[in-house]
Image: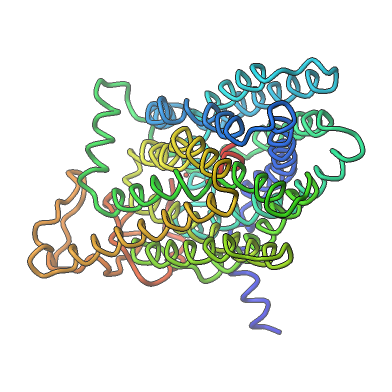
Amino acid sequence: MTSFAAAGRQTFAALANPNYRRFFSGQAISLIGTWMQTVAQSWLVLQLTGSATALGVVVALQTLPVLLLGPYGGVVADRVDKRRLMMALQAMMGLLALVLGVLTVTGAVRLWQVYLLAVLLGLNTCFENPARQAFVLEMVGTADLRNAVSLNSVLVNAARAIGPAIAGLIIATGGLGICFLLNALSFVAVVWSLAMLDTAALQPAPPASRTPGQLRAGLHYVRRTPELAVPLAMMALIGCLAYEFQVVLPVVAKQTFGGGPQVYGFMTAAMGLGAVVGGLWVAARGRVGVRALVNSAAVFGILIAAAAAAPTLPLELLALTLVGAASVGFLAKGNSSLQLAASPSMRGRVMALWGVAFLGSTPIGGPIAGTVSEQFGGRAGLALGAAACLVAAGFGALVLRRLNSPAQRAEVAQPADAVQPADSSQPADAVLPADAVQRAGAAQPDEAAPIRRAGPQRAGDGTASEVSQVEAA
């Protein structure tokens, strides 16, 4: 019984922080509404057009601002009060959901209006997402960062299990517009939770000064830091072609299995259920670093391939449950690895690039996945994502092999603001204490062991995210 209690404390360690509990509670309510809107919006576009390509275009328009302006959103996050910025932008997201709900309920909604609202939501996301990603570390510190990131992913995917199921029932009984209106109301909870935080207990990173070349400096910093560049490159490919489930799954539900919004809702809920289990495992025992990310990408690809081949709906739901677990594992490991490796002064810009790799790649991948699914079926759309994961895993493995070769270790460039370790021959997968990384502001090497909780002397500086367009909302 004692060991069970200890395991529970380890799994939910970040919730011992009062500020994080408030933040977590507000997000719980809001994310259920956001998943309801995601299901309803996908079905609305299919009703208006009957086209999977149009569905991909909507997703692309929602994420195009992240691709174009996401890096600058990271510069802004490094400069301003992240909490106040999030409050303003979350309120705006609620207003956009309200407008879409009113248009749908009154029967006035047109496809161009959905396109326009998707662009406006994307503009909010490109500034809100990096601020939220970095803000988590300011609440919980380095000791509980991996746990908090994993719990955020659990939350997103618990909402994925609940929201779509509710949306399917509401769409069948009350119509699509009700989902949008309920989502608008849910943003009140997240704004309230941010307003009620104890600001004295936060550990904000020093704001970056407004100097020319900050965006260029962030890009250069990432380029010469393999512990950042490799996960971002892997996420760019996987985010582009694998995380297009809201484009592919409606086609799988409708064309492959002859179902309606309820079947799509069950598929999304199955992924969410699996992601909850996977997220809790990562929260308690997950590992971070490039090596762990490579393994996670390979497993993710194999399970998506299994979903593409599932012959019956029950087997499809089982496969998607496993896909959900692998999905949240990859996201949580990548997010934690970047935040722990990044210098505090660069963290907002690094996480903005994570958002660009994850969401900003969708304007390219969304239409591709939609076209492939429309022309060759939903199974082909899933197979495309599986191939992307396996290619990304192979790329990461090759880079790790190169970095760990004796001839290359001495040539790996160190960040300009990093403290050179005493043993320059240290391999890329060696373990460094997280507090040493925090003091140095250096990139943490890839590690094969979990990040261990630090003693009370540690100070922390800022995620969820996840996670699809929904997780950025």
Q: Going by the picture, which residue comes out furthest to the right?
A: 173
Residue at x 9% of width, y 61% of height: 410
Q: Position of residue 199 (x, y in %)?
A: 58, 37
Q: Quadrant of residue 178?
A: top right
**Residue 56 located left or right of residue 234:** right
Q: Quadrant of the N terminus?
A: bottom right
Colour scheme of the rendered structure: rainbow
Q: Going by the picture, which residue comes out furthest to the front?
A: 375
Residue at x 7% of width, y 66% of height: 407
Q: Is residue 465 visible?
A: no
Q: Quadrant of the C terminus?
A: top right
**Residue 338 located left or right of residue 41:** left
**Residue 188 located left or right of residue 347:** right
Residue at x 47% of width, y 67% of height: 299
User: Eyeballing the image, is 7 above or below 134?
Assistant: below
Which of these two is toward me, 287 or 209?
Answer: 287
User: Eyeballing the image, is 333 above or below 2?
Assistant: above
Residue at x 62% of width, y 49% of height: 20
Which of these two is toward me, 353 or 244?
Answer: 244
Which of these two is toward me, 320 or 204?
Answer: 320
Which of these two is toward me, 149 or 371?
Answer: 371
Q: Position of residue 362 (x, y in %)?
A: 48, 37
Q: Is residue 314 visible?
A: yes
Q: Position of residue 108 (x, y in %)?
A: 79, 15
Q: Position of residue 223 (x, y in %)?
A: 23, 43
User: Eyeballing the image, is 95 above or below 391?
Assistant: above
- Say how many tags the image has: 0
